[in-house]
Image: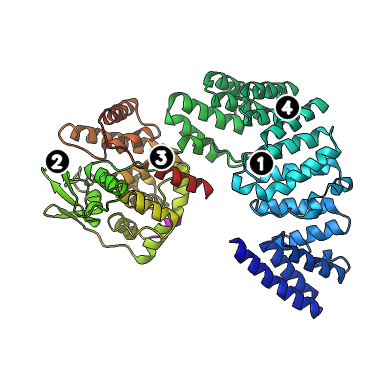
Amino acid sequence: MPEDDAALSAAEELALARLALAEGDLQHAAGHVAGALAQAPTLPEAHETLARLAAVSGGGVDLFPLDQHTYVGAAVARAHLLAATGHPGDGLDLLAAATGYAPQTDWAGVPWVTAPELIARITPEHVARILMQVCAAVPDPVPRAGRPALAAYLTLARNAVTAHPGHALLLGAASALARRLGEVALAIDWAGRGVRAEPTKLGEVWLGYAYRSAGRTREALAALGRAVEHDPDDLAVYADIAGTLADTGRLDEALDWIDRALDRDPTFDCAVHTAHRLRYLRDGDVAHLVALADFARDHPDDTHEHGDLAECCRSRPWLGQLTPAGGPVADALRQAVAAEHPGIGATVRSPTPPPPSALRAGTAVGMRVEVTGNGSPDAREPRRAGTRRLWRYEGTIPVPAVPAPSVGAADRLRQLAHPAWPHPPAAYDAAVGLATLELADLVGLLVHPPEPPATAIGRVLAGQDPTMWVRCVQVWACLGMLHHRTDEPWAASTRRQVLLDLVWGVEDWITEAALFAMVTAAWVDPAVRPDVARVVAERLADAAAVARTRPVPIATSLAHLALATPGVDAETRELATALLGAAAAVPRPRNPLTRLWQRLTATLRRR
């Protein structure tokens, strides 16, 4: 909520609180004060009204009881009243809990928290616990925009360290917070002082992290190595050492450390996640990522959330995002947008019929497409007989051959479609939101894509690449089909048959979307992997054969899909690699999508 709106809302709450106070209705007054604090936790008027309420109610703490569903504003009000009645430690506990609930709100930015006198009223162990609780609730590092909301805790840490300069646990916890808030030099100083005061495993870990944040890898590894000496059974430190080595390109040494951890415990989650990530970085074999996805699925109760799979898939074709559409029409559309020309009146010549989705995207913005030949085999015919037809041709113009989807289906998909995802299993999970759509609606969405949403993502897609939104719709519609009649066994299922029809239909962006849906099915269900690997191999081989006689704009994307497929055979991998190598050797226009992807993936990470 914008600051002005928050202040106005808090002012209204406080006006109501004062009216309730004047009438002696303390319960309603307390509720409105809690509402004001939730909106503007550092507003002086809110604290003045809280003090008035405390004065007429014997301290006021009982007006803000704790239960399973305590409102955050009530918890914060109780925190301040506890501090005022001689229990500041309990108050800090509640403020830290509020920070865990909403880390970007400045819950603790009040005078009693930042006053040096507070430190005499609580133990250094209690301060350390508060700082560690805050660290557990925020990212490492905290983005710049989120740091002001945590500044009060850093002041608390400074005051506590000044009062207790030799308390090792406090120094280490303070270092951890300082590091997260970008105060790296301070973090090194505090952690170093903590280790000198009392050498411990945890102290060395904090020091190692501080050195690592400063880019001082040698010192970081030395500190983490000493942590292992303190406790050879803490395998999380092995994973930290491996990650630090990998960040500097020392993959062999990193894998040695991971192997040492796995020798001690082959199921230790941090080591398993790190091992698969490093092995993928070493040889690029997607089998490591599939194994990691399997491990995560089979061990849902890991000690904490890991980001290794998402890190490896980020920005990689089909593993973490859509590939840009290929072919002369898609290239011309992107160039027109980059040159700030909408394409009206432009003419593009294609040696063979382009994918129908590309042709319709071009004509939708006024672009004329001249097809100079048919090629062989005819790109307007399905690659296998008997598949359902989504398009019919009126001369050279493709026309949808299936009805448009319902308005509700279009709205539902518009809310979900995005060109990037953390990894294929996450895309599958997100598509469950389409599970209740009718199959006819999902099919209709493929050739009747709705307009982009009126959101930042929608505007970026429409303004940077006119092809991207259509491809998003098609990908998510096909992912939605994976959730259709899931009670049917895969081999004879409706969802498999429909996707196969789309894979072997007219060469189009829909081919890629349907094949990605099948590949995603293989990621989440090991039982379907042999079938999907066979389909992918056959479809890529067909595209390679056709490419010998005419252009196949989707061939590069199919090659990327093959390399993302679990269990695909070595021959198919070699063919995919060869197709990608041939595509890379062909000069192409400058890709204008780099900045677009950076903006979109940044948006995804903020979700």
Point 66% across, 28% down: residue? 211
Point 25% across, 56% down: residue? 365
Q: CA distance from mark 1 to mark 4?
A: 20 Å
**Label for residue 522?**
3
Q: Nearer the viewer, mark 3 or mark 4?
A: 4
Point 46% across, 37% down: residue? 313
Q: Earlier in the sequence, mark 3 or mark 1?
A: 1
Residue 539 versus residue 253 in the image, above or below:
below
Q: Is residue 71 visible?
A: no
**Label for residue 181?**
1
Between residues 120 and 525, which one lies in front from this camera angle? 120
Looking at the rendered structure, the secondary structure element under dot 3 is helix
Residue wearing tag 2: 351
Binning the other alpha carbons within 10 Å of mark 1 as few (below 14), some (14 to 19) or many (20 upward) gives many
Q: Position of residue 525 (x, y in %)?
A: 44, 41
Residue wearing tag 4: 204
Q: Nearer the viewer, mark 1 or mark 4?
A: 1
Q: Earlier in the sequence, mark 2 or mark 1?
A: 1
The quarter of the picture where residue 42 lies is bottom right
In the rendered structure, which amino acid carries the disc numbered 2?
Answer: Pro
Q: Position of residue 405 (x, y in %)?
A: 32, 62
Q: Is residue 205 visible?
A: yes
Q: CA distance from mark 2 to mark 1?
A: 57 Å
Q: How many marks?
A: 4
Point 79% across, 76% down: residue? 21
Q: Evaluate if marks 3 and 4 touch, with contact meaning CB atoms under 8 Å apart.
A: no
Give the main secondary structure of the magenta stretch: loop
Residue 177 versus residue 98 in the image, above or below:
above
